[in-house]
Image (cartoon, helix red, strand yellow):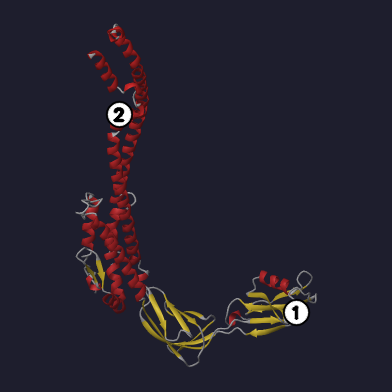
């Protein structure tokens, strides 16, 4: 009985008559063999988080660099000027960047007029006119152009197309109303030099609508004529847009720095600087509740950027009216972010916009903007920047782990085949054991049947 009990115990340990769960057994072995792979996957998750964090810093650094490029532009927003009229219904104006502050008095006695003619009304634009006739169009002091009324060119539509195809300095259109259709001729430009006449008209019957004349204005008492209602050159860097005439009425025009645009550009720089320094600081913040530190806390490049950003906020110019950010109303908070006193900044811009531009630009892009931009470039340069190098290194290490994983998976795939075959064979053998045990029991106890009776 002891031998029989032992054999039954062996059978039970090997799975009994039900055999082995081959799939579970093989998977358990493969799971153990994949221990290195799970460690690699954890490392790749870390790499993924580091890559995302670095890309975010890269983006924020690029945004700040773009702001600094705007502030560095010698003909850009820091030199922008605005021209303000005391009567915008009569006059508006614009000024190119760098235009000095100034005040002017403008009088608009007469607007420039564009010459125009129109024909007698026809029943429709396709009504046939009398063939064999003609008329001439003469623009300014140029030669007369003869327009023939003949088959194929004897309706208002056809005449308009013919005139427009000749680039005479006149544009033709057909205008229709309840009275019928008329051919309208309008000079391409306003002013007396662009005015034109229609002569020897024996069939279309043109009537002058407007005579082309020049605008007449006074700028600071100086009489000026202009073929256009957009006057350039009368005041250096300033374009006058004549909207209406009022003889003897003086309109004030004040030119000065575009405070709103300049302030907006500087505030944009501050906003993007704060976004970057806040993100950088967060990499070194330890969350005691979750026991988690910043993703890039060990990254030396990020440590260096934090130091240089804080150093940049203390920039000191060697010359100029404004030598620090603080002098412009931009102060540094305890966490390294910047704060703007809008009143102080706007006053600096209005009082001396040239000095504000000088602080950021220096004499040859060597001011504050150039200095910080150069610093950021050491991190964002697409070939040698510290962030670029970090990202390339992480990508390389991540690829190495991917290759290791692929190699291990190839090995485990073959192992799975081998182990499955081995366990299947063992399973078959185990399932045959009960019968074999009976045979052994019969050999060991040949008289078991007789004794039991």
Q: Position of residue 61 (x, y in %)?
A: 31, 58
- Please state the horizontal and vertical placement of residue 429, each as a whole percent of the image: 35, 17
Q: Residue at x 33, y 10 (%)?
A: 439
* Residue positioned 41% across, 80% down in the render: 83
- Asked if one can make out residue 377 in the rendered structure from this viewpoint, the answer is yes
Q: Earlier in the sequence, mark 1 or mark 2?
A: 2
- For label 2, the residue is 29
Q: Please name the residue that numbered disc 1 is placed on.
A: 122
Residue 325, horizontal then vertical, whole percent: 24, 69
Along the line of sight, the residue nearer the viewer: 73 or 385: 385
Q: Nearer the viewer, residue 220 or 34?
A: 34
Q: CA distance from mark 1 to mark 2?
A: 99 Å
| Nearest the eye: 441 or 179 | 441
Dot label at residue 320: none
Query: For the residue carrying disc 1, how many other residues have a C-alpha within 10 Å: few (<14), some (14-19), or many (20+)?
Result: some
Left or right of residue 319, residue 350 in this image = right
In which quadrant is the N terminus drawn? top left
């Amino acid at each position: 009985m002891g031998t029989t009990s032992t054999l039954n115990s062996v059978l039970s340990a090997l799975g009994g008559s039900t055999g082995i769960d081959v799939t579970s057994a093989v998977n358990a072995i493969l799971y153990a063999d994949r221990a290195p792979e799970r460690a690699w996957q954890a490392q790749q998750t870390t790499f993924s988080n580091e890559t995302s964090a670095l890309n975010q810093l890269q983006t924020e650094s690029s945004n700040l660099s773009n702001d600094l490029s705007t502030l560095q532009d010698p003909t850009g927003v820091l030199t922008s000027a605005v021209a303000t009229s005391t009567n915008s219904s009569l006059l508006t104006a614009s000024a190119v960047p760098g235009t000095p502050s100034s005040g002017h008095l403008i009088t608009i006695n007469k607007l420039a007029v564009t010459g125009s003619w129109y024909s007698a009304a026809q029943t429709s634009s396709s009504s046939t006119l009398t063939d064999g006739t003609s008329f001439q169009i003469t623009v300014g002091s140029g030669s007369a152009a003869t327009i023939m009324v003949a088959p194929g060119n004897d309706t208002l539509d056809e005449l308009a197309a013919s005139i427009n195809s000749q680039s005479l300095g006149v544009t033709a259109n057909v205008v229709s109303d309840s009275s019928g259709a008329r051919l309208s001729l309008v000079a391409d430009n306003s002013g007396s030099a662009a005015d034109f006449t229609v002569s020897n008209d024996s069939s279309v019957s043109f009537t002058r609508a407007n005579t082309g004349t020049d605008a007449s204005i006074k700028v600071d008492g100086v009489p000026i004529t202009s073929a256009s209602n957009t006057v350039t050159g009368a005041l250096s860097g300033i374009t006058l847009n004549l909207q209406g005439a009022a003889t003897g009425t003086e309109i004030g025009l004040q030119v000065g720095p575009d405070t709103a645009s300049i302030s907006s550009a500087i505030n944009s720089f501050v906003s993007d600087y704060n976004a970057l320094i806040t993100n950088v600081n967060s990499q070194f913040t330890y969350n005691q509740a979750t026991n988690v530190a910043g993703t890039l806390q060990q990254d030396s490049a990020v440590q260096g950027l934090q130091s240089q950003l804080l150093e940049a906020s203390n920039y000191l110019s060697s010359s100029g009216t404004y030598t620090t950010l603080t002098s412009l109303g931009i102060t540094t908070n305890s966490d390294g972010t910047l704060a703007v006193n809008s009143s102080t900044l706007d006053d600096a811009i209005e009082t001396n916009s040239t000095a504000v531009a000088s602080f950021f630009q220096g004499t040859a892009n060597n001011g504050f903007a150039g200095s910080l931009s150069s610093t950021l470039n050491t991190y964002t340069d697409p070939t040698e920047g510290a962030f670029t190098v970090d990202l390339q290194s992480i990508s390389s290490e991540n690829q190495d782990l991917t290759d290791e994983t692929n190699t291990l998976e190839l090995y485990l795939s073959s192992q799975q085949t081998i182990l499955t075959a081995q366990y299947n064979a063992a399973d078959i053998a185990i399932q045959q054991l009960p019968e074999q045990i009976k045979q052994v029991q019969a050999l060991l106890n040949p008289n078991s049947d007789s004794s039991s009776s």
